[in-house]
Amino acid sequence: MRVPIGFQFAGLHAGLKSTRKDLALVYSETPCTAAGCFTENLAAAAPVRDARERLPSEGIFAVLINSGSANALTGPKGLDDVRASREALAKELGCSADAVLCCSTGVIGHPLPIAKMLHALPKLCLGRTVDPVPAAEAIMTTDTRLKVGFRTFEVAGKTVMLSGICKGSGMVQPSLATVLAVLTTDCAISPEWLASSLREAMGSSFNSLSVDGDMSTNDSILVLANGRAGNAAITGPGEDYDVFSAALTDLCGQLAREVAADGEGATKLLEVDVKGAPTVAIARDLARAVAGSNLVKAAVFGADPNWGRILAAVGGRAGTQRYPVDPARSRVTVQGVEVYADGPLWHDPTALKAKMREPLVRVLVELSQGPAEAHAWGCDLSYDYVKLNADYTSLLVQAPDGGVSRDNRLSNYSPAFKTSLLVGALSYISKFRGQRCVIKYGGAAMVKESLKASFCRDVELLRSVGLQPIVVHGGGPEMVHAIEKLTGRADYVDGQLDPPDPLMMEMVLSGGINSELVTLLNREAEAAVGLSGKDANLLRAKPIPGEEGQGEITRVNKDFLEMLLKQGYLPVISPVGISEDGRTLNINADRVAAEVALAVGASKLIFLTDVAGMLRNGELLSELNVAELQSAVADGTVTGGMRVKAEASVRALTGGVDRVHIVDGRIPNSVIAELFTDRGVGTLVAP
Ligand code: ADP
Ligand code: MG
């Protein structure tokens, strides 16, 4: 990322948190004009009380930010610590203590570990570079994603750069959430107009976040301008000011949107637009009311197209504020589907539900009372939100990497919830005892460590409730990678590898992937047996004419599998076959899975892959029958690697397998979710 001229950044681990970076520096080689917007909380943290008195101003060189401790409600020591860190940093940088601003984020009521901070300052200053990423990392708390942004634009014929680092609210709980952002620009602009421009930017960005509708003790948005772009300084209204303000508003908007999307407990970003309102203030307030409505947020979490809640939220807010708007005379659109226009409209609730499963849910309310419009960002309200905030301190645990993570153990749920969960689960589980199920293991689940582990646990859980799983793995992304490494080239054609080199394939499949998978599975239980199709001639195959090294199955050694299953073993099969004349052949793993399912009389066949399931125009097809599947192949909806799965599914279902599931391997525990819930998470195909 490029950054404005003359700015430097640093971030390191000073020991405020157990292992992660926790101290950040934003520095300008030349003095800056600076402005800030702060929390209005009367319990504002010491660094906020210190900085807001001194802004807007000139002559600022640096911002020091720590995470790990909020330095809020820490008594007189709080302000003393801010002064001490300002002085120490100033000495290190060779500027005056007045040239330093501070921000803190972390736990309220914990005094700043000032000795650790002071100790780390020399190293922090030495580590300055033009890369803002270490600083952006050091201000993160429970953020899961880095938040940085950059804009470049022209002011009075000069190129101006603007960049920003930001952290969001870890908890989607107003009194604990903190937003910190430091924006830097090389634009020349007076402190007053910088402040005015920041105020303008706040309206449609950080002040349009419903998750932080009430501010924390530490919210601070700072902007530093050092004038190094060389433009004639902006000292009043006009075109230059407008261009600068527009860029600042735009960048703040991007960062605020990322904060909403990354709220803890949130699974989706909610974007609400209100149009046709009498004033912008009313439009913004109503948009925030919708984005902040618990009922709307819960519906978004559950992908429930219950649009009535949207207008109820508009009406409720408009009523208490006496806004001259009539919610009944409006148009409401959810994910591009019009659901209301002066009255309810017919729409297909299943289609809308599928659209609402997307990570971004858009709501548009068009009133008919004026020209003004505004937006607001929020997030959905998940079970995790309630769980987390019901007992915030005991449910957040220190992760081994020094961060915090959630304690997801079932024991944290209410007794009534646990009971109904158990009753539901047990009645499902009993149906599966003694049944066989073939799982084709492919896609992202094969590469990401956490997904591999969750897959192995799922397989063991299936075994523990009496289901008899068989795993067939593909080559997946690892195969491409390995062959690329060995040969310098690889092409994926139609879900199959080209050119195939049988020896290399065998090495990667049986020697590499199979053996690793068996090792992982046997950590959970000592039952996994790694098999190549050559073992006991498990997979007999014949060459496919014109496809060098590729084969199709002619026979599965059913007795061999039966013997293993009866003994309680878990067969893990690599898709390598053997021809009558002893040649090694590579077989598509989807086809192997289908043939194995038929051979052992499996009731289920599960394909774990890299997409949400079978899609049509980007929408998930959650249930299909064989005829529908065949026409989806015929009309070109299903192509490439998915077509191979579709054909294998048809073969399995017409041969006696009860159900085929195509499941998103990128979601942890997706196999369990598809099997043990009424409406699964992927595509279900039945005869
Ligand atoms: P795997 O490693 O799981 O076998 P593949 O790449 O072979 O994965 O097959 C899945 C791919 O099929 C998807 O990533 C997608 O690109 C492609 N595909 C083609 N048509 C569809 C469809 N209608 N729905 C979903 N995926 C499709
Ligand atoms: Mg494939």
Image: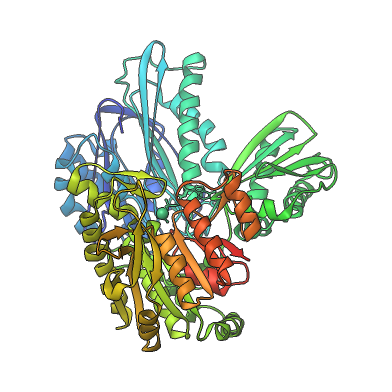
Which residue occupies 41% across, 16% down? 154
Q: Is residue 261 above or below residue 229?
A: below
Q: Is residue 333 above or below residue 534?
A: above
The residue at 40%/65% (across/down) is 554
Whether residue 550 sits left or right of residue 376 in the image: it is left
The answer, for residue 627, to whether it is visible in the render is yes
Q: Indicate the position of residue 111 as horizontal and vertical percent values.
A: 32, 62
Residue extending farthest to the front is 581
- Above or below, 366 relative to 40: above
Q: Residue at (60%, 53%) from the top-left corner?
A: 630
* Residue 396 or residue 675, whichever sits in front: 675
Could you tell me which quadrant the C terminus lies in? Answer: bottom right
- Closest to the observer, 207 or 96: 207
Task: Work out which residue is located at the far bottom of the displayed protein and give it.
Answer: 567
Q: Position of residue 71 (x, y in %)?
A: 36, 57
Give the residue drawn at x 26%, y 54%: 21
Rendered image coloring scheme: rainbow
Callout count:
0
Q: Quadrant of ligand 2?
A: bottom left
Residue 159 x %, y %: 36, 17
